[in-house]
Amino acid sequence: MRRWKLRNLYLIGFMGSGKSTVARTFSDKYDMKLIEMDEEIVRQENRAISEIFSTDGELYFREQETKLLRQIKHGEKQIVSCGGGSVLKSENVSLMKESGVFVWLLAKPETVLERIKDSQDRPLLNGKMNVKSISELMEKRRATYEAAADLLVETDGKSALDICSEIMGKLKS
Ligand code: S3P
């Protein structure tokens, strides 16, 4: 798995799987440029994710993800914390595959709930912030994450630093 060195690392996985925290830590530890897709879209749109969803809808948000990935793919040595739904569009997966490696972060629904229960930025879980709904959406998406992933790291009960070391170990092996 040497080719990643030249290009980018894309952290994919469900909301609350640890992508943002791990990306930040990985960026510090291995001197890679940090890109947080959600933050970048909020910056470019100058409004919150919940507002983008409520005003223009999920499809519009997905288009912004694609637009952003077209920009990101030209960069190198970047660690990208991807929006949890960004791999749902095959065009996005192709854009990312062209320019890097996918690391799938996986956490149990209970862990996810604990991490995101107070968030206002997950409109897909509005009024459904519970283990059952999280499990259902996760199951719907599992095959998509699995198909895209080059490697998998479980994040429950692990520190960000440990997860980064585990990712690096797997990339080198
Ligand atoms: C989404 C995940 C969120 C954000 C938006 C939609 C999804 O990002 O992009 O709320 O469809 O899974 P995180 O995975 O960073 O929470």
Image (cartoon, rainbow, N blue to C red):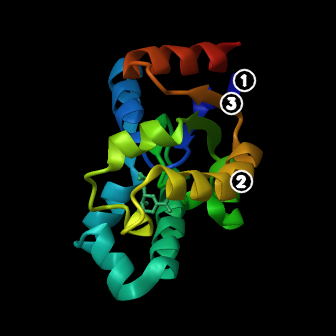
Q: Which residue is mark 3?
A: 151
Distance between mark 1 and mark 3 Cα atoms: 10 Å
- Under circle 2, the secondary element is helix
Q: Residues within 10 Å of mark 2 (few under 14, many from 20)?
A: some
> Of helix, strand and loop, which one carries label 1?
loop
Label 3: which secondary element: strand
Left or right of 11 in this view: 20 = left
Tell me: 128 left or right of 135. Answer: left
Q: Please say if 93 is above or below 157.
A: below
Residue drawn at x 68%, y 49% is 142
Q: Amino acid at mark 2?
A: Thr
**Looking at the image, do the residues carrying marks 1 and 3 touch, with CB atoms under 8 Å apart?**
yes
- Is residue 61 depicted above or below 143 in this figure? below
Q: Of the two numbered discs 1 and 2 on the same chain, state the one appearing first in sequence.
A: 1
Q: Left or right: where does residue 91 sit relative to residue 161?
A: right
Q: Which residue is at 44% across, 83% downward?
A: 57
Residue 136 position, x and y percent, is: 61, 57
Q: Earlier in the sequence, mark 1 or mark 3?
A: 1
Q: Position of residue 122 (x, y in %)?
A: 37, 62
Q: Nearer the viewer, mark 1 or mark 2?
A: 2
Q: Which mark is residue 103?
A: none
Q: Which mark is residue 1?
A: 1
Residue drawn 51% across the image and 43% down it: 109
Q: Is residue 98 visible?
A: no
Q: CA distance from mark 2 to mark 3?
A: 13 Å
| Foreground label between 1 and 3 | 3
Q: Earlier in the sequence, mark 2 or mark 3?
A: 2
Q: Quadrant of ligand 1?
A: bottom left
Q: Disc 1 to disc 2, how far (Cα)?
A: 21 Å
**Residue wearing tag 2:** 144
